[in-house]
Amino acid sequence: MTALLEVRDLRVEYRRGNVAAVRGVSIDLAPGESLGLAGESGSGKSTLALSVLRLLAPEAVRAVTGRILFKGRDVLTLADRELRSLRGGAVATVFQDPFSALNPVLTVGEQIEEVLELHAGGRNPARVRDLLARVRLPEPDRIYSSYPHQLSGGQRQRVCLAMAVAGGPELLIADEPTTALDVTVQREILDLLDSLRRDLGMALLLVTHNIGLLSERTDRLGIMYAGELVEVGPTRTVLSDPRHPYTQGLLKSLPRLTKTADRLPALPGQPPDLGRLPAGCPFRPRCPGAFDRCEKESPVLRPVQGAADRAAACHLLP
Amino acid sequence: MTLLEVKSLSKTYAVEAGIFRRRVGAVKALEGVSFSLESGRSLGLVGESGSGKTTLARILAGFLEADGGSVLWEGRPRESFSRNEWASRVQMVFQDPTASLNPKLRVRTLLDEALGQRARWDRTALSGRELKERRIRLLNDVGLPPDAGEAYPHQFSGGQKQRIAIARALAAGPRLLLADEPVSSLDLSVQAQILNLLADLREKFNLAVILISHDLTVVRQLTDRVLVLAGGRSAEEGETARVLAAPQSPATRNLLAAVPALLR
């Protein structure tokens, strides 16, 4: 199957601190597929996700190299007009904070109508009510004429989802969509995201620091560390049989309901400062298996032996 | 020995409206909540936002007065303690260490102020050398090198800042630490280090800990007992392992359902 989205050797450098937040990442997304991207602060996951629609503030970015192909066309070279029609149309986004994503002085209905006007052939109140019902908001008529501040956080994120799917996207990019919400609401929003994706046949790029959330929601999982993709594969196998020492160490360190010991096997150290990356492998200072080669040569992502659908970047692997 | 006893604690907030702040109603944030905590033991305080856990923590920290019920420290009512006496017994660690540390002060100054304050409460004075010794011991207790004192908070990572915030709380020599979501703003790979540190400190100083969290995996790891709050009332209380294995209240079941399968 041809990919819907192909990211090739993407590198994003910020002016501030003169750092590269994404350093040579390649990843594919098939139509209708859901891909999770997990990583900590400074891993580059959000920079990567925002780059897909060129949503990074131009004054903050020094250079973007590589290619981002959406249905074969390079987003990085699109004219402004084409880019505008892509945003909110074939590619939609939802972010962490639903309040700042909505216009406070327009009613919910008005904001969704605007999306329809731009991307779906014109205003259509019946369609807006249908969308509100689709994101499981009660009383679509009341919500239609409500302002964002009259809704709860979970309801606002549902409105954002309704706006996102209003343009009939083929790809939805969700960057920490539930981080600002209560734990029990998080689950509802993720369930909704899941069912929307299936019903509408969209592909989903779900970015989060909370690796646990991705376990039940995505087909494939990519793990990012210090601007690099260090491991990728089917979510289930990456989580049950991680190959990169970072993924292994991280998963082992997480507290669980089935507590096994009074102390957790914590990873030492902290995520690296992008301005002062160690030579060689960026994970080397925290890696229990590091050897001299790791200091000299940064490992590249390559297929895992015996698992064609998996890849990892580590010198320890055969 | 019972360190802290909370008896049918209640707190109501007034709901005001209009430019004259007319009272139009009331919200019961806490209604008849009771529990007790033994010296050196740990209790998890869990619930969704609006469950009353933050109100309860703020009352225990002494930031807020309750309307009804009582808080007893070794049998003595909280009102009979001065602000300083209470602060030398109960200290708090917050979710966001960046917001809780003064960015203009060196770590050394932050810790020395807290150590000096405790000495004054005890009506003693510390010499410069004693102060330095205690500061270095404190830094060591939280896993930081002696020269960490020379730097400013912003020069540290999130996990290290939380270590500094914990050191400052310990400087007051508390017997109870209130930890409000102490790891939820930290990077995932650093959370385990801080949870281990809190477990170490509990053991080393026979420190009682009340952990306020929405994350049941963290509560399971760190606490002996758990109190589940819902709508300002106690929904369930008991041994953490038992409550989480066989939840009796819908509130507990809801929170458990939010735990991803990966972490069960």
Image: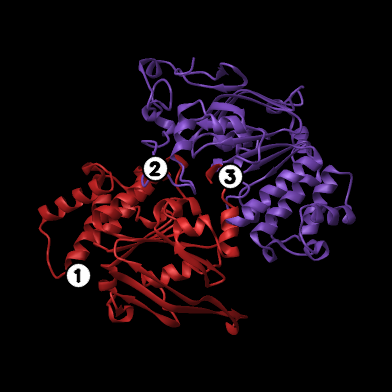
The residue at which mark 2 appears reads as: A264
Q: Badge 1 local density, few (<14 within 10 Å), some, or many (20+)?
A: some
**The N terminus of chain A, quarter of image:** top right
Is label 1 in contact with label 2 (beta carbons under 8 Å)? no
How far apart marks 2 and 3 lie (CA) works out to 19 Å
Assign a secondary structure to mark 1. Answer: helix
Q: In the picture, which chain is red?
A: B
Q: In the picture, which chain is purple?
A: A
Rendered view: B248 above or below A67: below
The residue at which mark 1 appears reads as: B121
Q: What amino acid type should be assigned to the residue bearing mark 3?
A: Ala
Q: What mark, if any, has residue B217 been given in the picture?
A: none
Assign a secondary structure to mark 3. Answer: helix
How far apart marks 1 and 3 lie (CA) works out to 49 Å
Q: What amino acid type should be assigned to the residue bearing mark 2?
A: Leu
* Image position, residue A165 (x, y; %): 78, 45
